[in-house]
Image (cartoon, rainbow, N blue to C red):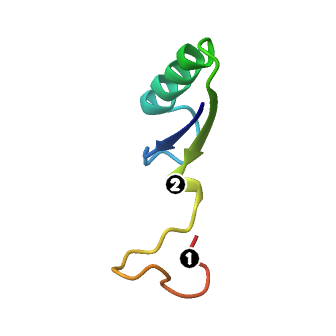
Amino acid sequence: MKTTILLGTLKKEGISNTQTLSEFFASVIGKHGSETEIIKLVDLNILPGTYTDMGPGDD
């Protein structure tokens, strides 16, 4: 099984409480054989909008 955690913290630097919780959750489900990826959304350039592609630079 594969698990993706979307980390929605607003903290760009340092470790947030949400990141600590996400890493703990990943370690727990990892013990049951799940491969986990944590994606920190604040590191991406996600533009607001209602279309699937908001133009150049939209991750």
In the picture, which quadrant includes the C terminus? bottom right
Left or right for 49, reference 30: left
Q: Say which quarter of the image contains residue 15.
A: top right
In this picture, is 3 found above or below 40?
above
Is the residue under label 1 in contact with that under label 2 (CB below 8 Å)? no
Left or right for 31, reference 9: right
Query: Where residue 4 sits in the image (x, y, percent)?
Result: 55, 40
Q: Residue at x 64, y 18 (%)?
A: 33
Q: Residue at x 62, y 32 (%)?
A: 36
Label 1 packing within 10 angstroms: few (<14), some (14-19), many (20+): few
Identify the element where label 1 is drawn. loop
Q: Nearer the viewer, residue 27 or 34?
A: 34
Give the labeled residue for mark 1. 58
In this picture, is 3 found above or below 27?
below
In this picture, is 34 found above or below 9?
above
Q: Residue furthest left?
A: 50
Q: Nearer the viewer, residue 43 or 26?
A: 26
Query: Where residue 51 sits in the image (x, y, percent)?
Result: 39, 82
Query: Where residue 55 sits in the image (x, y, percent)?
Result: 54, 88
User: Amino acid type of disc 1?
Assistant: Asp
Q: How many marks?
A: 2
Q: Which of the two marks, 2 or 1, is nearer to us in this view?
A: 1
Q: Say which quarter of the image contains residue 52.
A: bottom left
Q: Residue at x 49, y 21 (%)?
A: 25
Give the labeled residue for mark 2. 42
Q: Say which quarter of the image contains residue 35.
A: top right
In the picture, which quadrant includes the N terminus? top right
Identify the element where label 2 is drawn. helix
User: Amino acid type of disc 2?
Assistant: Val
Q: Which mark is residue 11?
A: none
Q: Report, in whole angstroms, how far the alpha carbon at label 2 lies from the one at label 1.
A: 13 Å
Q: Earlier in the sequence, mark 2 or mark 1?
A: 2
